[in-house]
């Protein structure tokens, strides 16, 4: 026969209290942790010691407008500008350009370096190899000065370039950049 009476729990009321406390503690341990304490505020770091600034080249002539009729070069390298400089010298001295191939013997061959500023002005000229004939040297220097101002090196700000002068005894010349070459005989 079966017992139909409800069974009574073997736990006493005090045991139920302990079990309830343990269950509450267990559930409390499963909850989300409290937020971490705020991070300590770091003291501001001192500014680094000033470093000596490198000198900066003046900006290209964007500040002041160029005079009317100013020729502008869009060259991005001294080698590119050399063509513009040679064309400029030829334009200023068209009557003095030797036509055709140069003869095998020249009165002078010189290599000159020109420094042109952001406004196309000649800053300096230096002989890397002067022509042996003094008259050719003086005439080339006069020709270079008289051709100023040069095309404004707009994209570079300023430029230093080198070209070779091929000087004929007649007082005519060619620049190596635009030369037609030299005859064998």
Image (cartoon, rainbow, N blue to C red):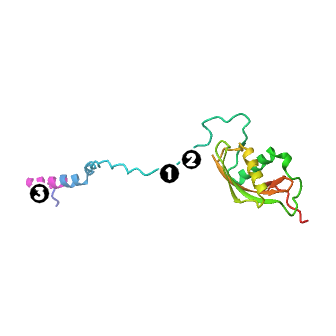
- Helix, strand or loop at disc 2? loop
The picture places residue 101, in percent across and down from the top left corner, at 88, 58
The picture places residue 7, in percent across and down from the top left corner, at 14, 56
- The residue tagged 2 is 57
- Helix, strand or loop at disc 1? loop
Q: Nearer the viewer, mark 3 or mark 2?
A: 2
For image coordinates 64% across by 44% down, the residue present is 118
The picture places residue 134, in percent across and down from the top left corner, at 76, 57
- The residue tagged 1 is 54
**Viewer-closest of 85 and 12:** 85
- The residue tagged 3 is 11
**Viewer-closest of 27 and 119:** 119
Q: Is residue 14 left or right of residue 34?
A: left
Within-10-Å neighbours for mark 3: few <14, some 14–19, many 20+: few
Which quadrant holds the C terminus? Answer: bottom right
For the residues bearing labels 2 and 1, Cβ distance under 8 angstroms: no
Does residue 21 belong to the magenta stretch? yes
Q: Quadrant of residue 128?
A: bottom right
Does residue 58 belong to the magenta stretch? no
Q: Is residue 8 visible?
A: no
Where are the magenta residues, as a range?
5-23
Cα–Cα gap, marks 3 and 1: 88 Å
Cα–Cα gap, marks 2 and 1: 10 Å
**Viewer-closest of 148 and 9:** 148
Q: Is residue 107 visible?
A: yes
């Amino acid at each position: 026969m079966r017992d139909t009476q409800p069974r009574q729990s073997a736990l006493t009321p005090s045991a139920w209290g302990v079990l309830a406390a343990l269950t509450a503690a267990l559930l409390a341990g499963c909850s989300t942790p409290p937020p971490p304490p705020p991070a300590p505020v770091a003291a501001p770091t001192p500014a680094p010691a000033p470093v000596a600034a490198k000198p900066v080249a003046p900006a290209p002539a964007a500040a002041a407008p160029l005079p009317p009729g100013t020729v502008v070069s869009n060259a991005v390298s001294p080698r590119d500008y050399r063509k513009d400089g040679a064309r400029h010298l030829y334009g200023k001295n068209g009557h003095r350009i030797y036509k055709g191939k140069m003869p095998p013997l020249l009165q002078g061959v010189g290599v000159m370096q020109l420094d042109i500023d952001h406004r196309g002005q000649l800053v300096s000229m230096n002989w890397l190899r002067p022509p042996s004939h003094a008259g050719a040297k003086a005439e080339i220097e006069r020709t270079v000065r008289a051709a100023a101002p040069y095309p404004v090196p707009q994209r570079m700000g300023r430029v230093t370039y080198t070209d070779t002068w091929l000087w004929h005894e007649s007082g005519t010349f060619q620049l190596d950049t635009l030369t037609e070459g030299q005859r064998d005989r």
